[in-house]
Amino acid sequence: MTPSREQKLWMYEKMLVSRRFEEAIETIYLEGKKPVFNMAKGPIPGEMHLSNGQEPCAVGVCAHLEPSDVVTATHRPHHQAIAKGIDLKRMAAEIFGKATGLSGGRGGHMHLFDPAVNFACSGIIAQGMGPAVGAALSRKMQGKPGVAIAYIGEGAVNQGAFHEALNLAAVWKLPVVFVVEDNAWGISVSKAASTAVPENHVRAEAYGMPGHLVRDNDPYEIFATAGKAIAAARNGEGPSLIEIETMRLAGHFMGDAETYRPKGEKDGLTLRDPISRMRARLIADGDADEATLDRIEEAAQAEVDEAIAFARNSPDPDPADALTSVFV
Amino acid sequence: MTNTNPARANERKLTIARAMAEATAQQMRLDPTVFVMGEDIGEFGGIYGNTRGLIAEFGAERVRDTPISETAFIGAAVGAAQDGMRPIVELMFVDFFGVCFDAIYNLMAKNTYFAGGSFRVPMVLMTSTGGGYSDGGQHSQCVYGTFAHLPGMKVVAPSNAYDAKGLMTAAIRDDNPVVFMYHKGLQGMGWLGTVPGATNHVPEESYTVEIGKAAIARPGKDVTIVSLGIGVHQALEAAKRVAEHGIDAEVVDLRSLVPLDRETIRASVAKTGRLIVVDEDYHSYGVSGEVIASVVEHDLSVLKAAPVRIAYPDVPIPFARVMEQFCLPNADKIVAAIETMLGRQTVGEPS
């Protein structure tokens, strides 16, 4: 399964929106945090987990999804949210803690919920896997079309929730695909130091489901593999797991000094930045010329600028609204 | 007084287990999105009988035995609820929450808030509570306060079958997560003793008991005893015994912990001036302290005596019968507390 030219350009565009969005967030996040870094200060307080480098995992999978399909994502959710089609303006406003945010400021960047595209994320490792299994169960029981995607990082594979979710999805043969974004680091602990097997796709076999490995953060390979897995889920063939070798270009969170990284690792990663690689590939393959890609760049930047401006210009929530929405 | 249910001899009586199953079946007939899942809730009918008969009527698709995998299936219930279903999920013993609480208090209870109300989580988590039958310290706890403390989940704990059916129906229809905590000692299982008062008249038709409304289980004027679940029956027994000595105790059955009906508690204590709270959950930082705080932070002047709590001591629950019974609340302890509070000797042998 190869992406069409149109799909390739969509993937590139969404990767760019994600990257430009995070670049903007990165800059604004540091406002008010200099010269002394204090996480509580500035227009965007709290932890900030950037996903730059991991964009191919988002677009290669979400290219196959409809708004009605369900995605549960992680504490590092921006790229997945954007690829799923989340309302970028309201997502930005939520990250700023504004009244116009997706949740009126109650959630923040680790708790983005958009019912229009069935997107949710959560802050604890492997936490979204059960809900993804449940959404898939719901579709199966109601006879409604749709698959669920549970995005996790490679650090999640050692959580009990991972193993329980895989087993339950398999024993009930549910339309769910587990996507492991392997960025090689669980905060500061390497996969080699934390995980008993060198590759995690093999774990799928223990639960009687197919496990796939995509190397080198390749968006087209991710597209092809996810396409097969999602089609199988839609056809009632049950769950599967996709492991993707990706890269975390930034620290675990902003402010992470990354002293644990081997010397030179970051330089090597930057050389393999998936955005510049994809741009070169689109041109080399004759899928787009420079002018076309420049237009996509400009449109992506404009979309991000608009979302950031919307967030900046939105009012703070009424503090007392903290006491509402506990129950519906 | 709300939703009291005076039993009459010729009326149909059900156990709490049967009442829960009946409420569930009635809602499943009405609403195809309602389904049940949990460990041994299918052919077995639930360890405590509350799903008996459901699989025969609705089949294994909607009455779903799960693996022993609470994190996955409670998490799945959250995902299914957010996707338009109304799952009823069973945590066999509340003590088991330790293996799956993340799905309960960080997902089930918080997603609606984090989503600013744009996601709904209409699910029921039913779970057994309580000891008194020497099942050891991981199969005997109540932990009411733990659930009620954490925001985002409604919590109910019926003392009798009438309330159990009405609260179960209300819980299934609620668009929010509801934790339905049923006491094993009230459940009506043949293999486990049951307090007789828990098995009472239950109408066949569907009805609700409003979540968040306490009931006056026995009206009185001298002292208020607030309790829930099995403690209500101990309080009623104590009230009966002190009545023989001229003390008129009022018994408040909380029925719901979240929302807590502070108005009914305050009105009762305003009338009696005395408050005793009976709670099988651990003594400190729990329901008993919250009930007392609800009164004293509102109006200290109504009190004629310092409030008293009769709760489980702050120790893990021991196995040995004499040790466990020593720790549990009972009618004797309540009678003694009333006697001390009213400053007179009332205790006689139970009639």
Image (tube, rainbow, N blue to C red):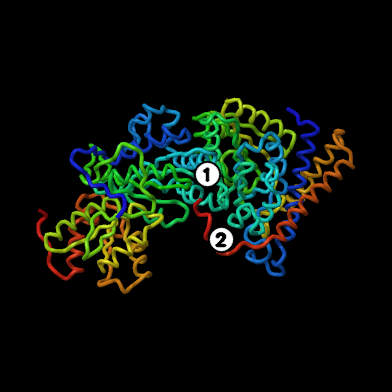
Image coords of residue B155 (percent x, y):
39, 51
Q: Is residue A207 left or right of residue B198?
A: right
> Are the residues flagged by discs 1 and 2 in contact, CB closer than 8 Å?
no
Q: Quadrant of residue A34?
A: bottom right
Amino acid at the residue labelled 2: Asp
- Give percent across and percent down for residue A253: 65, 56
Within 10 Å of disc 2 (Cα), the crowding (few <14, some 14-19, many 20+) is few
Where is mark 2, residue-wise? A321
**Closest to the observer, A271 or A295:** A295
Image mark for residue A299:
none
Give the x, y percent position of residue A252.
Answer: 65, 53
Q: Which mark is residue A159?
A: 1
| Residue type marked 1 | Gln
Residue that appears at 72% across and 69% down: A35
On what subunit does the disc labeled 2 rest? A
Residue depicted at 68% across the width and 38% down the height = A62
Residue A113 rendering spot, x and y as whole percentages:
61, 48
Q: Quadrant of the N terminus of chain A?
A: top right
Q: Is residue A258 above or below residue A243?
A: below
Q: Residue furthest bottom?
A: B301
Q: Nearer the viewer, mark 1 or mark 2?
A: 2
Nearer the observer, A110 or A160: A110
Measuring 86% from the left and 44% from the top, which residue is drawn there? A295
